Amino acid sequence: MMHLLSVIVPCYFNEKNIPVTFKELCDNELLFPADVGFEYVFVDDGSRDNTYQELLKVKAQHPGKVKVIKLAGNVGTYSAVIAGMEYATGDCSVIISADLQDPPELMLKMYEYWKQGFKLVIGNRKERQDPVLQNLFSSFFHFIMRKIAFKNMPEGGFDFVLFDKFVRDEVIKIKERNSNVMYLMAWMGFEYVSIPYSRKQRTLGKSRWTFRKKIKLFIDSILSFSFFPIRVISVVGIVLGMAALFYAFFVVYAKVNGLVAVEGWTTMMVVLLFVSSFQMTALGIIGEYVWRALDAARNRPLYIIEEVK
C-alpha cells in the first residue's frame, strides 16, 4: 500500500537555506521504502528577503511534488505550520525547520514508529550545538514546562515531529491562537514515542528567533497549558491575607498594652510597596489571560494567505 508523507517546512528569511535544504530532503527520500511518496509544503512566513523567489525555483523544478504557500505577513512559526497543515494531504506529516539543524535522516525512524501505530512521534533534543545563552534559555523553558504543564514531556524540548493525518485534522479544527502547536499535539493525549537526537549548529543564514519571540513563546506556552500562574496568585494572596490578619492582631495587642510608642512609617511603606507590586504583577498575569480570551473572541484568522503555488 502506497503511503504519502507530507513534509511541512516553515520558512522565514531562509533564502540561503532553501536550495541546500531541499537537496538534503530529496536525498533523504532514498532511505525510505519504494512504497512511500513525498510532498513538500513550504510556507513563507512573510519573509522580506528572496525566500519566496527561491521557493518558486524549487517549485518550478518539481511542480508535482512541491507546494509553496506565501503568507501576507509574519505570523510566527507555529501559525505558519498550521497554514502548512491545511495544504498537506499525506497519510502522515512531519515538521522540520528550514535551517537543517534537525537531521532529515531521523524521519525514517519516525515513519517506522508511525507504521507501528503511533499517531505522534517526537524528535526530542538531547543536545544542542547552539550558543550558551540560547541553551540556557531553552533548558529553563523546558524545565518549567515539565514542572507545571507536561510531566511526561521528553527532556530537551522538541519541534521536530511526525504525526498522523488524524492529529493534523484535529489541530486544524482547533486553530488555537497564541499557543504552541507542538505542545498542542502532545496535549491531545495520544500515546507517543520520543527519539533523542543532537541538534546541529546553524551554518547558513542568521536566526530570526529573537529574544522577544522566545519570551512570547514562553508566556504563550505557560498560559495555554497551565493554570499555575493563576494558582500562584491565589496562594500568595491567601498567605498575604493571613499575614495581614496576624499582624493586625499584633498591632491591636501592642496598642492596647502600650507597646507601640511611634508609628512604624518605614515598615508601613515597605509593606505597602510589596503588596502593591504583587497586585500589579497579579493584574498583569490576569490581563494576559483576558487579552488571550479577547483575541480568541475576535475570531480573526491566524494568517492571511497571499498566494499558493
Image (spheres, rainbow, N blue to C red):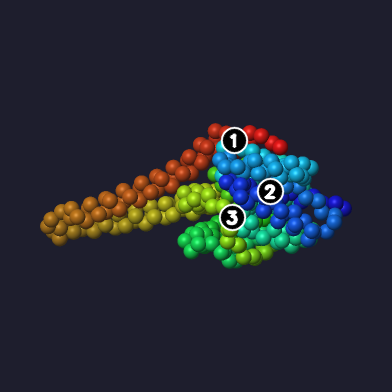
Q: Is residue 174 visible?
A: no
Position of residue 199 measured from the top left corner of the image (x, y, whole percent): 60, 62
Q: CA distance from mark 2 to mark 1?
A: 18 Å
Q: Is residue 4 left or right of residue 106?
A: right
Residue in view at x 64 percent, y 65 percent: 197
Name the residue tied to disc 2: 8
Picture coordinates of residue 173, whole percent (x, y): 67, 41
Asked if 25 appears above or below 43 in the picture, the reply is below
Residue under label 1, please give it: 72
Q: Which residue is mark 3?
A: 204
Q: Nearer the viewer, mark 3 or mark 2?
A: 3
Of the pair 245 and 212, the residue shown nearer to us: 212
Q: CA distance from mark 3 to mark 1?
A: 25 Å
Q: Quadrant of the C terminus?
A: top right
How many neighbours does mark 1 have within 10 angstroms: few (below 14), some (14-19), or many (20 or more)? some
Q: Amino acid at mark 2?
A: Ile
Q: Answer left or right for 159 relative to 22.
A: left
